[in-house]
Each structure stands twice: as structure tokens, then as C-alpha cells.
Amino acid sequence: MTESETELWNLIDSFEIDDEHSAFPFSERLARDNNWKLEFSIRTIAEYKKFIFLICISHHPLTPSDAVDQAWHLHLLYTQSYWKEFMPLIGREIHHGPTKGGGEERTKYTNCYEMLKTRYIEIFNEELPKDIWPSNKIRFGEINFVRVNMHRSWVFPKKRKR
Amino acid sequence: MKNLQYFTPAEAFLILYPRKSSRGDLLKATCFDLLMKGVFQTHSENVRSGRDRPRTLKYIIVGDSFKGYQFLPHEGVFLSPYLKNSRIKMMMSSLVKVGYENSNSDRWFKTEAFIKQPRLNSYFNTFFLFQFLGIRLLNSQGKKMREMLLSEIAQLEKELHKLQRTNKLQAADLVSNIGGCIILLENFQSDVLNEINSKLKVEFDSLMAAASANNSCSSELDMAWGLWNSFHDSGCSSCSSCSSCGGCD
């Protein structure tokens, strides 16, 4: 990391998304909405910050993992935190661009995800946690998500493929 | 004092009060012990945002003793996120919640993380029916150990009481020798313990409220709450209610 990159990273890393006075902070909502353990949610937020940093220092678009994308989506819902606090802090406006669909887009996003992983290792000098940053096959193969009303539905896991 | 040095405070607490000790007691003792051992440390940081002035938050991060630390299963509930990412930082309230969530249930935590472990299984009656019903009873070896621990605590309290007036340096040495087991002393107070106490109590309160809404098993919950209060009650006020929301929080 260059000096200015280190400075930017320190700014991003020091940003606290959780409101310490909130009875139901961001990390807990992220865990609840995705049926994750709080531990996974907190680790994902740490990875989300890394992702935002990598976007800031890269000259090409990057694609997050689904978990990190969920953290990003939720942060975008906290409009005050995202647009009025986080973006001014890092001095940029990072917009979220959903896919337009189709084969071409899939190839584009697959490449962007691959680039992200390469850049991550280069910059942070560490392996990506596989549970948060899965392989391309899982990232772009398991994309069938729905919102379920748990008061009216039971959810049973399918038998895992070996 | 060899037993107080050998056991973690949570293990010692379970031997001393096998039926009375709650999951919250054991978690609180474990968290405190990890801080005392330097596996965790507190870290104050100026948190920034674009709009507001920086504010200072206190985080729990890994301490000097973290690297290479051979953790016990009951310590793993707190250490788990740090083992996956040693640079992670968590506010105490989050750490307490993570520990609580990772400890699964009262029965699982006490049985799997403590009683079935080699360090403790020779002190408890492991009859299948007792385990099935969640009854924790000391066997004869366990009772003997309990007596030894009680005697060591009494001896320590006596020595500390005397040293606090005559030789404070030696008193500090004595405290550092037994680490987190200091919380077993009746008159012990510390800011760190009080913080853990209050956060855990709020978390416990909130989870109990949520569980109560789902279960309506109030007598059991009341009993659990009573046990919580009985252990070095910090006297903090209870939390609002439950953490679930109806729609968009």
C-alpha cells in the first residue's frame, strides 16, 4: 500500500457502522436478515470495508461476494450512514450497479470478481476467507435467493451435494 | 493455590457451584479471564464519520498472548471470530453477544464445553440420565476438589486482606498469579468485570425477553434470571425489551 492508500484504509477501517447506542445495530440486523450468526455478520462487515477500499484504489469495477453484497445493500438502506457519513469520509461517491442480466453481464461480473480476489491478495497480503469469498462457481452458481416470511413458512435445507 | 492457578475461573465456578452456575456466569468469567491473560485487550479508537466529530469507542482486540494460545473449548466461543481474522475488532457488547450465541444453549455449553472435557470430567457424575436431564452433580473426587478450592479461596482472601495494608506490591503479585480466578473472591470489584457484567446482563435480558415471547415458559425464565442476579450482581438497570423488529427498523 502506498502512503495515501494506507491513510485511506485507516479512514475506512475506523468507520463504525454499528451505532453503539442502538438496541438493534447494523451488524445484528445484517445477521437477522440473512439468518447468519452474529460472528459471521461482523466478519462480513470487516470484509465489506476491505471491498470498499479496493474499489477506491482500483481503476476498474470490482464485484463483491454475495455476503459482502448483502452488507453493502443494507448499508445503502442506512442512507444517512452511507451517503452523509461514510462517503464524505472517504471523499467519493460509490454507487451500486446491479446486473442488467444476460450472458455478457455474467462474464463481466465473473471477471470483476476474479480481479477483486487478485487485488485483495496483492493489497492485503492474505488469503480471502473462503466462507465469505467463495469460489466463482458458488458465487455465480448459487444465486437463487428469495425473501421468506418465517411466520408462515418452514425452511428445510436441501441435502448437500458431495 | 495450585488449583486456582490451574483452573480457569469458569471451571472453578462450575466446581464450586455446579447447580447454581448459569451460562451467563460462565461466559462472564471466561471473558474476564481472557482479558486478564492478555489473550484479549481493550483498545480505544477515535471513530470517524463524515459529519460528526470523532468519538472514542472501546474495542476488544487480540492481545499479546493471543498468538499460539492453546484455548479451551469454553474459551472458543469468544475466540472464534478472532481465530478466523485476528485483526477483527469488536465492541464489548458485540463480543458478549457473539459469545452468548456461540455457546448455543445452557445445557450444551455446560456439558460439552466443560463437563465432558478431560480437565473436568473426573469431577462430575457422568451418569447418562443426569446428563440427559441436565443435572450436574459432583462425584466424590469433585467434592474433594470443591473443598480444596474453597480452602484456597479462604486462604487467599485472608492473605490479600493482610497484604493490602502491609505490602501492596506483594498483593498485586498474588493477584496476577491467579489471574481471572480473582473474580471468585467475594469482595472483588473491578471496572472491567462490571462492564462485562452489565453488557452480559443486558444481552441475557434481551434474549430472555425474546425467548419468553416465543416460549411463554415464564417460570423457567424467571428462575434463570434469579440465578443470574445471584452472581455478583452489578446492580445495573435492565434493558428495554426484545431486539426483534416488526418491519423496517
Image: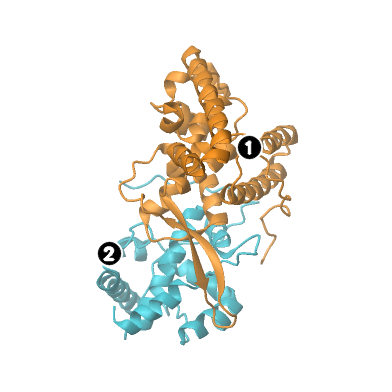
Q: Position of residue B16 (x, y in %)?
A: 56, 25
- Residue, x 41% and y 31% (percent of image)? B6
The answer to whether residue B3 is left or right of residue A21 is: left
| Residue visible at 71% across and 52% down in the picture | B239
| Residue A69 in view of the camera | yes
Q: Along the line of sight, which residue is nearer the eye, A104 or B48?
A: B48
Query: Which residue is at the front of the view, A150 or B121?
Result: B121
For the C terminus of chain B, which image quadrant? bottom right
Quarter the N terminus of chain B occupies: top left
Query: What's under tag 1, amino acid-wise?
Result: Asn
- CB atoms at circles 1 and 2 under 8 Å apart? no
Instruction: Give me the chain letter of mark 1.
Output: B
Which chain is represented by orange in the image?
B
Residue type at mark 2?
A: Glu
Residue A126, numbered label: 2
For label 1, the residue is B187
Q: CA distance from mark 1 to mark 2?
A: 46 Å
Q: Residue A86, position in %: x, y? A: 52, 79
Question: In the image, is A54 to the left or to the right of A81?
Answer: left
Chain letter, colour cyan = A
Q: Report whether residue B184 is seen.
A: no
The answer to whether B133 is drawn above or below residue B208 in the figure is above
